[in-house]
Image (cartoon, grey):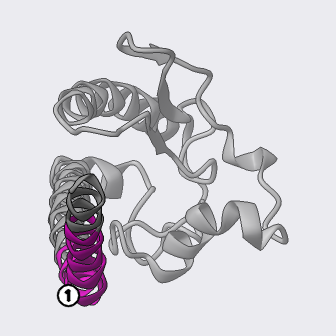
């Protein structure tokens, strides 16, 4: 009697194990396919979310740059620049007087101070900005070079020594194209012509 119970128990356990193995064997490809589909779907969602975040970030930076460029060009006083010999058709051919140079340097110092305040506001409200600067062509002014601010750590922006463009090598295109290309194309301010 005991051997019949053991046999029935063994057959039952074997049948249960066989069913478990059979169910696992049949369901594994289905579960794997569903798992792969869910992984792909999740990765696509993460990719779309990351793309939207990057687009928003880059659009914010682009908007800030455009705003800074518009403020810089719109706040230039073309009359003072013309009168001081820094702009106009004959700016390159004519020498500036000491009075013109002094007036231009005084104007540019005030202009850069106002511009730096505007740039600081824009930079502090734009995520990811670590540096902002404004560089004045040394052929326009030898005294005023602009400004340069850089973020050190997590605190605000610290004033750095402004860039003196006379130290840039025009042949070093990899490091100076940011400076020379706008001058060559006169993108920022078409009525200013470098030279005296």
Q: Is residue 118 visible?
A: yes
Q: Is residue 69 visible?
A: no
Q: Is residue 21 magenta?
A: yes
Q: What quarter of the picture does the C terminus occupy?
A: bottom right
Q: Which percent across, then down, holds residue 48?
A: 17, 72
Residue closest to the eye, 117 or 82: 117
Toward which corner of the image does residue 3 lie, by quadrant? bottom left
Main SS class of the magenta portion in the image: helix
Q: What quarter of the picture does the N terminus occupy?
A: bottom left
User: In the figure, is residue 46 to the left or right of 140?
Assistant: left
User: In the figure, is residue 56 to the left or right of 82?
Assistant: left
The answer to whether 86 is drawn above or below residue 46 in the figure is above
The answer to whether 135 is drawn above or below residue 194 in the figure is above
Name the residue beneath numbered marker 1.
Answer: 30
Residue closest to the eye, 66 or 164: 66
Q: What stretch is highlighted in magenta?
A: 11-39
* Residue at screen point 40% across, 14% down: 154
Determine the residue located farthest toward the front in the rendered image: 1
* Residue at screen point 68% across, 39% down: 164
């Amino acid at each position: 009697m005991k051997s019949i119970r053991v046999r029935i128990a063994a057959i039952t356990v074997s049948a249960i194990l066989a069913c478990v193995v059979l169910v696992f064997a049949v369901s594994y490809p289905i579960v794997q396919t569903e798992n792969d589909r869910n992984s792909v779907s999740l990765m696509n969602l993460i990719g779309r979310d990351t793309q939207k975040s990057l687009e928003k970030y880059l659009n914010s930076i682009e908007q800030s740059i455009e705003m800074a460029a518009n403020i810089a060009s719109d706040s230039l006083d073309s009359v003072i620049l013309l009168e001081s010999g820094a702009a106009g058709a004959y700016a390159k051919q004519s020498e500036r007087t000491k009075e013109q140079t002094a007036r231009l340097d005084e104007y540019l110092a005030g202009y850069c101070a106002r511009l730096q305040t505007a740039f600081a506001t824009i930079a502090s409200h734009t995520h990811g900005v670590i540096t902002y600067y404004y560089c004045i062509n040394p052929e326009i002014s030898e005294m005023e070079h602009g400004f340069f601010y850089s973020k050190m750590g997590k605190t605000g922006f610290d004033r750095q020594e402004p860039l003196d463009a006379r130290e840039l090598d025009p042949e070093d295109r990899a490091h100076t194209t940011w400076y020379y290309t706008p001058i060559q194309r006169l993108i920022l301010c078409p009525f200013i012509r470098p030279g005296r």
